[in-house]
Amino acid sequence: MRLVPFVLISLILVEVAGAVEIGTVSIRGEITEGTFITLEHAYKQAKAKNLGLLLIELDTPGGLLSSTQKIVSLFMNSEVPVVVYVPKGSMCASAGTVILLSAHIAGMANGTAIGAATPVTVSGTAAENKTINYLASYLKDIANARGRNPEIAERFVTEALSLTAHEAYELKVVDLLADSREELMEKINGKK
């Protein structure tokens, strides 16, 4: 039986400190081509409406590398700042780790974790060394571009390293910890 990922789209305009409008998208489930299409659509809407931020709430065990790379490219080239947030009760493993690291601002709630980004084949076995080496370099480059810890990013792939939200914050993998969307937005406003 093939599970169909659940993607909840809620492009809602919200006021942040009375000044900035944001678009919000919740992604839950496996990262697929449909996830990329959803995020591309949300980005186009955010850009067309001249929104100040695009907030992605992420809960994923991982997914397809090809779709993940498209999402990373979208975020890295985005004219609208992208915030990826892992809310309480969510997971950010494998492809989710790559997506979180590519955001302009990366946030996690306490009690969540990030990592275990070693690529696997469709059968669930570890990928070939060349794929692992490529992905490690790719993630390291993303981390460097976003001012995050490149050595830890590399270890997510080469060692299947996983970190708690607090560890990720202390090791400069994510920018902030927040236990709610409201706290996240308050902290983002404080960073301006």
Image (cartoon, rainbow, N blue to C red):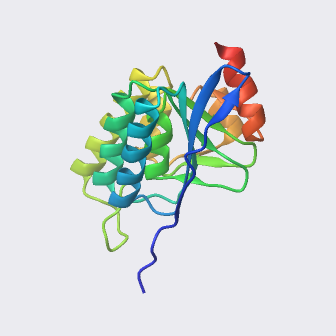
Q: Residue at x 31, y 36 (%)?
A: 73
Q: x and y percent of residue 174 in the render?
A: 59, 31
Of all residues shown, which one is farthest toward the front?
Answer: 49
**In the image, is 124 to the left or to the right of 8?**
left
Q: Residue at x 29, y 59 (%)?
A: 127
Q: Is residue 98 above or below residue 173?
A: below
| Quarter of the image that includes the C terminus | top right
Residue 16's quadrant in the figure?
Answer: top right
Of all residues shown, which one is farthest toward the top?
Answer: 192
Q: Residue at x 69, y 19 (%)?
A: 189
Q: Is residue 5 above or below residue 119?
A: below
Out of 99 and 163, give the one closest to the viewer.
99
Q: Residue at x 37, y 60 (%)?
A: 34
**In the image, is 56 to the left or to the right of 74?**
right
**In the image, is 183 to the left or to the right of 39?**
right
Of all residues shown, which one is farthest toward the bottom?
Answer: 1
Q: x and y percent of residue 5 in the render?
A: 47, 68
| Quarter of the image that includes the N terminus | bottom left
Q: How many numbered circles are shown?
A: 0
Let me know if residue 68 appears in the view.
yes
Let me know if residue 118 appears in the view.
no
Q: x and y percent of residue 2 in the render?
A: 41, 81
Q: x and y percent of residue 132 in the render?
A: 30, 48
Out of 154 and 8, give the one closest to the viewer.
8
Out of 188 and 22, give the one closest to the viewer.
22
Of all residues shown, which one is farthest toward the left?
Answer: 130
